[in-house]
Image (cartoon, helix red, strand yellow):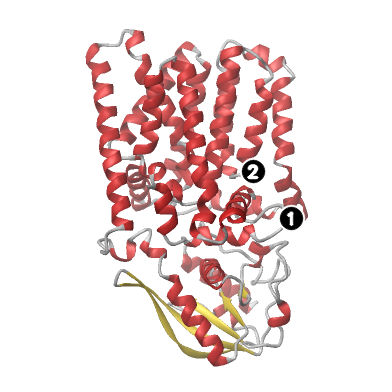
């Protein structure tokens, strides 16, 4: 089902954006480390620039993650049924059972974080300090996938400090060698940032520290999103098991229980806190739950051995079975809705349909270019930029004229076809062309095009001829064309900042 889903589902805007990264030879990127670009380049080198090719490495990441997850649980419990339970939980969670087909930095992070935890489980099992070196390698690869891997540091610190072995590892050279290995593996991101004024670190810091007013809606969005993506029954099962695992681990100083429970509860609590004032992205907590599935499967296997009351043992098994059965039904239903059903039940808020139908925009844009004599396309939205590049396959230069810090170290997109030539300006309504007010650009309206999905208009885009101006592809950091949008801020604040910069 995932392979079919990956083949027929249109690329989402972020996936197309990461695909544009895969065409560049640069050490890192503003938004994320480079692993996702390497994943996509691997898949497209085999299957070409197709939906399946872009998503192929992510599809491979799922069974690899499941094998690691199963072996973690098997080594802790010595029970293959518990290992199978963890794998089934992952299949029954919508985000993994189906939406793991959608490639994202988290798709790359998950197998590496599980490999790191697997190495630490092997360390606990064998006492062989050399497993620290493997953990360092996979920890570095996790960071090379997404910076949210830093949220696992409290769990690793607790893994070292809470059990009785703390003095052994604090005095040992191996954990420090593991840190050194992780830093060396992560060095491409450090080098790139050193070359570009620590741009991506500053970018993420602003997103993490942006101040907003208290908002119950964003909290509800976060909880609702987790219930939808993990499962309305599975999420409470996993959180309850993670809590019991924490109680067991910290009470008995069990290294693996401490590691797994802290790796789930600390990031979940952080995102819960952030959701009080900020909308948490749909993929941000994605790295948490595979470790939660491991904790849940281990907890269910351990309860009979610890002489828990029979009703609690039976209850845990009952609710786990309900969670898996209901979750698998949801996964199948969503798969059929997006691959077989012709209807749109959710309207403009549909998470897949909300980013589908860009082929219509690209086709109309290409036609208007021929009619108007334009040789390149300009936009002010990275999503429109990415989707136009994907559908036009770089037959014409597509330029995001603002937020140029997103494109540091990128190759020349074809300046010889841009400089001195008219372009086609494409923007989503309401049109936000205020940033061009301080330039010599002249915009001439050409028309509109609608993006339609299953008979419903999802968005409308304006098309204008742009003449009399050539964009600066490498503007200085003080330029309003350099700055990336404060993604943690709302659009109104962004407009205010752009207008103020333009006036100055």
Q: Residue at x 50, y 14 (%)?
A: 254
Local packing at callout 1 (Cα closer than 10 Å; few below 14, some 14-19, many 20+) is few
Q: Residue 12: give x, y in percent of width and height.
A: 46, 60
Whether residue 444 is visible to the viewer of this picture, yes or no, is yes
> 311 or 483, which is in the foreground?
311
Helix, strand or loop at label 2? It is loop
Tell me where residue 455 sits by quadrant: bottom left
Residue 489 drawn above or below residue 232: below
Residue 450 drawn above or below residue 331: below
Q: Residue 477: give x, y in percent of width and height.
A: 71, 66
Q: Residue at x 67, y 32 (%)?
A: 137
Dot label at residue 64:
none
Residue 223 drawn above or below residue 369: above
**Is tag 1's residue or tag 2's residue first in the polypeptide sequence?**
2
Is 213 left, or right, of 184 in this rendering? Answer: left
Q: Which residue is mark 2?
A: 144
Q: Residue 83: give x, y in percent of width and height.
A: 41, 24
Q: Quadrant of the C terminus?
A: bottom right
Q: Residue at x 76, y 51 (%)?
A: 194
> 274 or 177, which is in the foreground?
177
Is 212 left, or right, of 157 in this rendering? Answer: left
Q: Which residue is mark 1?
A: 197
Q: Residue 260: give x, y in percent of width and height.
A: 48, 26
Whether residue 400 is visible to the viewer of this picture, yes or no, is no
> 277 or 103, which is in the foreground?
103
Mark 1–mark 2 distance (CA, rounded to whole Å): 19 Å
Tell me where residue 178 sits by quadrant: top right
> 22 or 139, which is in the foreground?
22
Is 305 left, or right, of 376 in this rendering? Answer: left
- Which of label 1 and label 2 is nearer to you? 2
Residue 238 drawn above or below residue 76: below
């Amino acid at each position: 089902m995932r392979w079919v889903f990956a083949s027929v589902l249109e690329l989402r805007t972020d996936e197309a954006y990461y695909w544009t990264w895969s065409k560049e030879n640069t050490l890192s990127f503003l938004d994320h480390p480079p692993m996702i670009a390497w994943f996509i380049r691997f898949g497209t080198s085999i299957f070409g620039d197709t939906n399946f090719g872009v998503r192929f490495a992510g599809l491979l990441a799922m069974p690899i993650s499941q094998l690691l997850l199963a072996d973690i649980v098997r080594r802790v419990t010595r029970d293959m049924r518990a290992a199978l339970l963890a794998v089934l939980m992952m299949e029954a969670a919508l985000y993994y059972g189906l939406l793991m087909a959608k490639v994202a930095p988290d798709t790359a992070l998950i197998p590496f974080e599980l490999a790191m935890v697997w190495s630490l489980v092997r360390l606990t099992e064998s006492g062989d300090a050399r497993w620290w070196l493997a953990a360092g390698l996979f920890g570095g690869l996790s960071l090379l996938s997404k910076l949210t891997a830093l949220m696992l540091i409290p769990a690793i610190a607790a893994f070292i400090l809470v059990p009785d072995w703390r003095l052994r590892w604090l005095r040992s050279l191996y954990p420090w060698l593991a840190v050194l290995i992780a830093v060396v593996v992560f060095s491409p991101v450090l080098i790139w940032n050193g070359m570009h004024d620590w741009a991506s670190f500053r970018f993420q810091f602003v997103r993490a520290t942006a101040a907003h007013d208290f908002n119950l809606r964003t909290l509800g969005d976060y909880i609702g999103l987790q219930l939808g993506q993990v499962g309305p029954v599975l999420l409470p099962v996993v959180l309850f098991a993670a809590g019991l695992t924490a109680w067991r681990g910290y009470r008995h100083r069990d290294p693996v229980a401490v590691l797994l429970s802290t790796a789930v509860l600390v990031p979940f609590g952080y995102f819960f806190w952030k959701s009080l004032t900020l909308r948490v992205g749909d993929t941000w907590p994605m790295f948490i739950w595979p470790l939660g599935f491991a904790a849940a499967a281990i907890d269910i296997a351990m309860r009979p051995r610890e002489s828990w009351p029979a009703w609690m043992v039976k209850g845990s098994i009952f609710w786990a079975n309900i969670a898996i059965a209901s979750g698998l039904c949801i996964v199948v239903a969503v798969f059929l809705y997006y691959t077989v059903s012709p209807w749109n039940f959710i309207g403009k808020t549909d998470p897949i349909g909300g980013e589908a139908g860009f082929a219509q925009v690209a086709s109309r844009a290409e036609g208007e270019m021929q009619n108007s004599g334009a040789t390149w396309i300009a936009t002010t939205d990275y999503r429109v930029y990415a989707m136009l590049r994907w559908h036009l396959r770089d037959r014409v230069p597509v330029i995001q004229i603002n937020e140029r810090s997103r494109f540091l170290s990128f190759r020349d997109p074809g300046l010889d076809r841009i400089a001195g030539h008219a372009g086609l300006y494409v923007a989503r309504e309401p049109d936000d062309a205020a940033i061009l007010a301080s330039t010599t650009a002249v915009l001439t309206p050409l028309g509109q095009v609608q993006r339609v999905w299953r008979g419903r208009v999802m968005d409308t885009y304006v098309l204008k001829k742009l003449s009399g101006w050539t964009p600066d592809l490498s503007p200085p950091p003080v330029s309003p064309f350099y700055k990336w949008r404060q993604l943690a801020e709302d659009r109104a604040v962004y407009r205010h900042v752009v207008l103020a910069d333009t006036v100055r």
